[in-house]
Image (cartoon, rainbow, N blue to C red):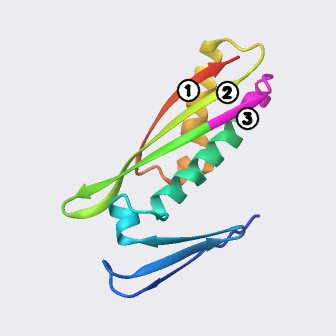
Amino acid sequence: MAIRKAQAEWKGSLKEGSGVMKFPGYAGPYTWSSRFEEAAGTNPESLLGAAHAGCYSMALTGDLGKAGFPPSSVSTEATVTLGRVEGKARILTIHLETEAAVPGISNEEFQQIAEGTRTGCPVSVALAAVEITLSAKLVH
């Protein structure tokens, strides 16, 4: 069983304060403005998107390989939409956009496997309360 840890620290008030999020190999500052506006820095939603994109890319590689179609590359971008529901900040949607180079597979087979991975990768399962959509493109 793999156990992973991350850390965050916040100092100051909500809107004027700042913090740092850390995990092995990464440390990034975040603020109210980097989360709810477009200021420099990171935010929990971007890190969540990176985790989801990474998980999906690895899981799709594994699922394609199990089906007999090992890909030469898989690239995924996750777009996490943060909005308000009943006045509270909520993650509304996550859209995964993936491109994969997969020798010998038909687009129909690729789409079927990609969709199965969308609902089955560990991060997708953990985020099941959020609407997760997918655009999958087969490239050569």
Q: Which residues fall within the magenta stretch?
A: 64-75
| Residue type, label 3 | Thr
Q: Residues within 10 Å of mark 2 (few under 14, many from 20)?
A: many
First in sequence: mark 1 or mark 2?
A: 2
Furthest residue in direction left, as rendered: 86
- Within the magenta stretch, is there residue 5? no
Q: Residues within 10 Å of mark 3 (few under 14, many from 20)?
A: many
* Residue drawn at the location 23% of the way across and 57% of the way down: 85
Residue 53 shown left or right of residue 45 in the figure: right
Residue 77 on image: x %, y %:
55, 40
Instruction: Please determine whether, in this image, residue 86 is positioned above or below residue 66.
Output: below
Instruction: Please determine whether, in this image, residue 47 is positioned above or below residue 135.
Output: below
| Residue type, label 2 | Ala
- Within the magenta stretch, is there residue 72? yes
* Residue drawn at the location 62% of the way across and 28% of the way down: 99
Q: Where is residue 1, by image quadrant?
A: bottom right
Estimate the spatial distance between the alpha carbons at disc 1 and disc 2, rounded to whole Å. 8 Å
* Residue drawn at the location 59% of the way across and 41% of the way down: 120
Residue for badge 1 = 136
Name the foreground residue: 107 vs 34: 34
* Residue drawn at the location 29% of the way across and 54% of the way down: 83
Specify the label residue 100 is tagged with.
2
Estimate the spatial distance between the alpha carbons at disc 3 and disc 2, rounded to whole Å. 9 Å
Q: Where is residue 95, by image quadrant?
A: top left
First in sequence: mark 3 or mark 2?
A: 3
